[in-house]
Image (spheres, rainbow, N blue to C red):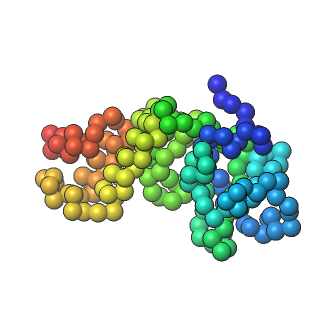
């Protein structure tokens, strides 16, 4: 069952990806709420605008901002999310899957209730997801790990490991061993 989020509950244990907006949209507006850390919130019938210098973990929430640096001023960035874009978050349920973001072209985590989820992706807890994301970062940005795996094509090896990590429950050592099988 999907919870209905609104201005009184969206900030309690939720996951959301906010879309970047120009700070100028909110210049003349008074925030409905300002947090202790200085984040400003502006409520609408459709959703919420947030101006903040910190994204990612926000209190009990996982909120990410899809942005490029051109939308920032003095470190503060503005984003908007529809109320329907908020999903429940906790550390015990398998709520997250990993895929390559169409926006950043990096591997990121997403909530199972997002429209892009398919059963091809493995669901994991937040802690398991963080571990796999760290492994993916190493695989995609470094090469020294590859010298321990016999291969003729680094990109083929990378693709094999990445696909295995995001679509199976196999651990990285098992995937490494099975590459040449």
Q: Going by the image, does 142 lie left or right of 111?
A: left
Q: Is residue 152 above or below residue 88?
A: below
> Residue 162: x and y, percent?
33, 48
Judged from this view, the residue extending furthest toward the top is 1
> Residue 105: x and y, percent?
47, 58
Q: Going by the image, does 55 lie left or right of 167?
A: right
- Residue at 68% from the left image edge and 31% from the top image edge: 3
> Residue 164: x and y, percent?
31, 41
Q: Going by the image, does 126 lie left or right of 70?
A: left
Considering depth in this image, is 171 or 62 the residue closer to the camera? 62
Q: Is residue 18 above or below residue 172?
A: below
Q: Quadrant of residue 137?
A: bottom left
Q: Quadrant location of the C terminus?
A: top left
How many numbered circles does the render carry?
0
- Residue at 76% from the left image edge and 57% from the top image edge: 34
Residue 27 visible in image: yes
- Residue at 37% from the left image edge and 46% from the top image edge: 132
Judged from this view, the residue extending furthest toward the bottom is 74
- Residue at 73% from the left image edge and 66% from the top image edge: 22
Q: Quadrant location of the N terminus?
A: top right
Q: Going by the image, does 62 lie left or right of 41?
A: left
Q: Quadrant of residue 123?
A: top left
Residue 115 visible in image: no
> Residue 17: x and y, percent?
61, 50
């Amino acid at each position: 069952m999907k919870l209905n989020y609104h201005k009184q509950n969206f900030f309690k244990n939720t996951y959301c990806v906010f879309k970047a907006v120009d700070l100028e949209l909110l210049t003349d507006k008074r925030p409905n709420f300002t947090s202790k850390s200085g984040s400003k919130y502006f409520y609408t019938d459709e959703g919420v605008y947030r101006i903040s210098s910190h994204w990612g973990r926000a209190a009990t929430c996982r909120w990410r901002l899809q942005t490029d640096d051109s939308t920032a001023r003095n470190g503060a960035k503005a984003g908007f999310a529809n109320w329907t874009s908020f999903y429940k978050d906790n550390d015990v349920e398998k709520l997250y899957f990993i895929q390559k973001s169409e926006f950043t072209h990096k591997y990121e985590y997403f909530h199972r209730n997002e429209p892009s989820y398919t059963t091809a992706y493995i669901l994991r807890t937040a802690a398991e997801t963080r571990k796999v994301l760290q492994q993916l970062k190493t695989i995609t940005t470094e090469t020294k790990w590859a010298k321990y795996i016999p291969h003729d094509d680094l990109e083929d090896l990378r693709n094999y490991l990445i696909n295995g990590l995001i679509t199976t429950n196999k651990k990285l050592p098992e995937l490494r061993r099975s590459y040449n099988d």
